[in-house]
Amino acid sequence: MAKDIATGILLTPEVVEWTALRQSKGRSEVFSDGRIALPPFVDAEPDAAAVSLLEKLPGAISKTSVVMALPSTQLLLRILELPAVDPEELADMVELQVDKFSPFPIDQIVVSHEVLARDENDCTVLVAAAKEKVIDEAGEELKQQGLRIERIDAALLGRWKTIVDSTKLSMEGRETLVIISDNMVEVLTHETGNLIALSCLGRISDLDDPEAAVEVAQEVAHLMMGVEVERGRARAQTVTLWSEGDYASFSTALESVSGVLVHECSLRDLPSVSHGVALRALSGGGLLDLTPDAWRRTASSSRTRRLMLVSALVIFGLWGLLVGGGLGMFAFEKNRLHRLEASAARWLEPANEVRRLRLQVNMIERYTDRTYSALESLREISQLQPEGVDLTSFTYRKGGGMDLAGDADSGQLVNQFNESLNQSPLFVDVKSGTRTLTSKGRHRFSFDIKFPEIE
């Protein structure tokens, strides 16, 4: 996955070089870069002056994802043709191949690979290996400056990236690139932009010497011959010398030994190696990564601790918010209750006075309302009373109802009287009491009559 910001750092015994890039709107821009010459090492350890120079790295890059590039002198580099298999099986095949050509035990080195090209049957794989001790020593120097190293790349691939982006590659046939920088000679071979071979001949400080130039030229010619034996003769062969100075003796020797015209280009026209490393990081994808497993475990453990710490802080923060919110809500509701109680206390006496007035008004209305008076009730009963029914008792209860008793010639008349009273709009409920027969054969009855409830 591509990133928006990345820093490439090249650390060699002679220099520390960095470039920090920010990607915006499909373009990358440099927001920090530099190069610091380091004093010579003493007993394989940097002296105090070297450490102080490392401390001059800008603090801005400590906030970015840092990719550390190792020089070719610290790497074993090969390009292999392997079957196109799944990633896990390909990694196992790469480790097996490295075990064959590596001079170091497999448990002492870090191995990684990058797929350069793939089709249905085969894939071209760039394989890199480095001693874990070398990586630890280089990485420790940068970690002491507070840098977070996310990935470890090869410096030669950063240089290859800058050359590709310069559009100065020959896209016809096979081209061999001889790169001379800081007295180090590296050789890349590609066909139409696809890398097929790479090698490092080490640091050679006397290339101006004709004899040394011829020896190095012969080494380059042997590498070209090896590629030709492995892949066959190319229909077009080109040799390009990339350097930072004038290597006329070497260029002449290389033309004489290889029999191919040598074109010369200046590395000063290209961005730095660290710039190319940062560009590779911005592009993302399945890139070479020589980060030791111990670093990954430490980083994973550190991320886990940070995540646990952040989670704990978030949980405690939420708990604090909940508790604080609960206490605040409790205090708010308590204060609100006190205000309501105070308000209720202020309005209690006026409310009671209103209730008393309403009660008095209701009582007056009830006693002045003649709708359910005794006379009106008796009038209604008299109108509904059938022939053959005599009333013997009439008890009126103000606002409650009345009790009615009497005699009838038959039980049918009692039922008829009861039904008529129930249908009257003046009464809401008429309940029949006990019924008995008198000595004269008449049916004695009683009714409990209810009035509508007045609010």
Image (cartoon, rainbow, N blue to C red):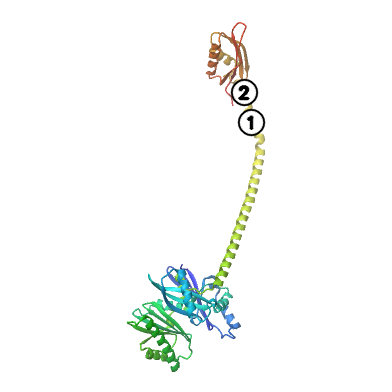
Count residues near mark 1 (Cα–Cα under 10 Å), then give few for <14, some for 14-19, many for 20+. Answer: few
Q: Secondary structure at mark 2?
A: helix
Q: Quadrant of the C terminus?
A: top right
**Location of residue 304 by image quarter:** bottom right
Q: Which mark is residue 323?
A: none
Name the outermost residue toward the top. 440
Please indicate whether residue 213 sits to the left or right of residue 39 in the image.
Answer: left
Residue position marked by numbered label 2 in the rendering? 364
- Circles 2, 1 touching at the beta carbon (< 8 Å): no
Depicted 44 relative to depicted 66: above or below: below
Amino acid type shown at disc 1: Arg
Amino acid type shown at disc 2: Ile
Q: Position of residue 380 (x, y in %)?
A: 55, 15
The reply to whether residue 272 is in sight is: no
Name the outermost residue toward the left. 235
The reply to whether residue 85 is in sight is: yes
Residue at x-position 64% and y-position 45%: 336
Q: Position of residue 69 (x, y in %)?
A: 50, 77
Q: Earlier in the sequence, mark 2 or mark 1?
A: 1
Cα gap from disc 2 to disc 1, whole angstroms: 14 Å
Q: Position of residue 134 (x, y in %)?
A: 55, 79
Q: Which of these two is toward me, 20 or 345?
A: 20
Depicted 363 relative to depicted 240: above or below: above
Q: Position of residue 22 (x, y in %)?
A: 47, 71
Count residues near mark 2 (Cα–Cα under 10 Å), then give few for <14, some for 14-19, many for 20+. Answer: few
Q: Which of these two is toward me, 71 or 164?
A: 71
Q: Which of these two is toward me, 51 or 1?
A: 1
Residue position marked by numbered label 1 in the rendering? 355
